[in-house]
Amino acid sequence: MLYREAGDFKTSYPEDSQTFPIAFDRWRYWAVLAIAFLVIPFVINDYWASSLMVPFLIYAIAAIGLNILTGYCGQVSLGTGGFMAVGAYACYKLMTAFPDVNIVFHVLLAGGITAAVGAAFGLPSLRIKGFYLAVATLAAQFFLVWLFNKVAWFYNYSASGQINAPERFIFGTAVTGPSAPAWAQYLVCLVFVTFCAVLARNLTRGSLGRSWMAIRDMDIAAEIIGVNPLKAKLTAFAVSSFFIGISGALFFAVYLGAVEAGDSFGITKSFLVLFMVILGGLGSIFGSFAGAAFLVILPVFLKIIGVDVLGWPTEMVAHLQLVIVGALIMFFLIKEPHGLAQLWRLAKEKLRLWPFPY
Amino acid sequence: MLDEGYVTADGRQIGGVMMDMRGITLRFGGVEAIKNISFDIREGEIRAIIGPNGAGKSSMLNVISGFYNPQEGEVWFHGKRRPPMKPFQVARQGIARTFQNIALFEGMTVLDNVMTGRLTQMKSGMLAQAIWKGKAEREETANREVVEKIIDFLEIQAIRKTPVGRLPYGLKKRVELARALAAEPKLLLLDEPMAGMNVEEKEDMSRFILDVNDEFGTTIALIEHDMGVVMDLSDRVVVMDYGRKIGDGTPDEVRNNQEVIDAYLGVAHD
């Protein structure tokens, strides 16, 4: 009953092309934002922040980034972990080199540096497509992780080979380091997620986004209508890596605090983010959130059910989780290649006609 | 232009030479797809390229739109020799085209597909688009207005928010035409716009082609196999066979050309 378009007349093109054309969707969006900003920070505790909310928000940024590259521009990438590592190490180097500058700038700059690195590794995409490109980005993944382990300059010659996030403050509150309160970590990530999501939405609905999608759907036709494939592909790599770099910087500085490239940004990370994008929905900002939420919540949910309720051994539940995620990936690839976002879209289509479908 | 053009049978004034193909030869390895062909396309005219299968018609269109660069010969556009170009650079010169087998962006809506036709006109930078409010939004609205006029013109208003993948064949052809028109091209290349259509759809498409030429003054070069359509629509016809040009002139001249008749009907061997 709530979800209606009848009587909601659009009288201008901006109104017609807004993100949420249906009034109810707009209200829901503002309600979610209000709860996220005004309610959750006051009730969040360490457990919920570190096991659910903070990783969810950070992975959502990474998923948005990969979705721009793979979902919108159609370039398969397995280098997400490596690019997150670039973001993390860039942020670390900036934090230690310029301790007086606010960390917000460090994170943004880390995103910018990752964008440059991503665009450089995107160059092969001009010649190769599909699986072959995936293999080329795989090379980026292994090269970058190797580089951060091998060259001591990146971890400031520390004995452990790890990088540790020094304590940094925003408005007098610690957001990194061991004494950072849960709500501050959460809020910082939330601000970045909101920023990235709005940015991604705007970029994907304009002429740049259309040129990406044109390349994805049919590159020959894209070229014939005037899309420069070089520009379209490299901007997709750059923008995608910008978001992934931000997520890597936050993953290191805010979430983990201490990082070793091979452990935290290995190939499994690339696959995890790719699974988020596939499960959530290729070519959808909402899908990035849905996929990230799903794959962050699933292990926690399974642990609660398996270990706490049923009393199964922890290792068994951990293995079971791999089985379930694998099965789900196959299920989605066969049954719903457009992921959770498509299920959501179909549900909304149904809701528009409910309770009187014709 | 030195020459003044000519007046067609139905009284339309045709202007000077817009595109001049001079001695084009295109080879794929040892195969000569096009052999030393010259012809011109004049301002405001509907120019047809016909010929049996494998005659090199599509290759010719691909030379014009920049997919292939000929080994020999020159392409002159608006009185200037065109250097070898990539297809997207050709598009920016004001040449748009449709494909023999539809080349739409299946994952996007009709509206988005047609909006991609405006990409050459949309200039706002990445930062402006990321902020959206202001320059990017104004530009989007201005281009949307142009696109909506074309959507009205081709009578596809009802499907503008439908993903292209869900549309039937005839409508897809029309959307592809809309996308090409959205670029407001000076020269429109149509590669078999009526292939696989029934009589009514062909009539619709013919009407749209004539209307485009009439209302926007767009010069059109088309490849088509339906002789009735070609002879009715076009002002001048180039006939190709085995990569050679065997005829060039008004539909009546071409119809009575012995070499053309031989190519289409075959020659008696005695």
Image: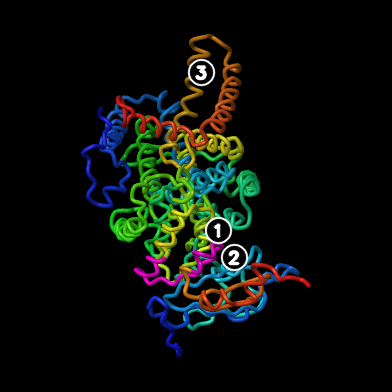
Q: Between disc 1 and disc 2, whose residue precedes?
A: 2
Question: Which dot, 3 or 2, sits closer to the camera?
Answer: 2
Spatial separation of the CA atoms under disc 3 and disc 1 = 56 Å
Check residue A143 for magenta coloring.
Answer: no
Q: Position of residue B10 (x, y in %)?
A: 39, 75
Assign the C terminus of chain A to one quadrant of the image.
top left
Q: Are marks 3 and 2 in contact (CB under 8 Å)?
A: no
SS under mark 3: helix
Residue placed under numbered mark 3 in the picture: A303
Question: Type of residue at label 1?
Answer: Gln
Q: Position of residue A302 (x, y in %)?
A: 51, 19
Assign the N terminus of chain A to one quadrant of the image.
top left
Residue placed under numbered mark 2 in the picture: B58
Check residue B215 for magenta coloring.
Answer: yes
From this view, report whether residue B1 is shown above or below residue A312: below
SS under mark 2: helix
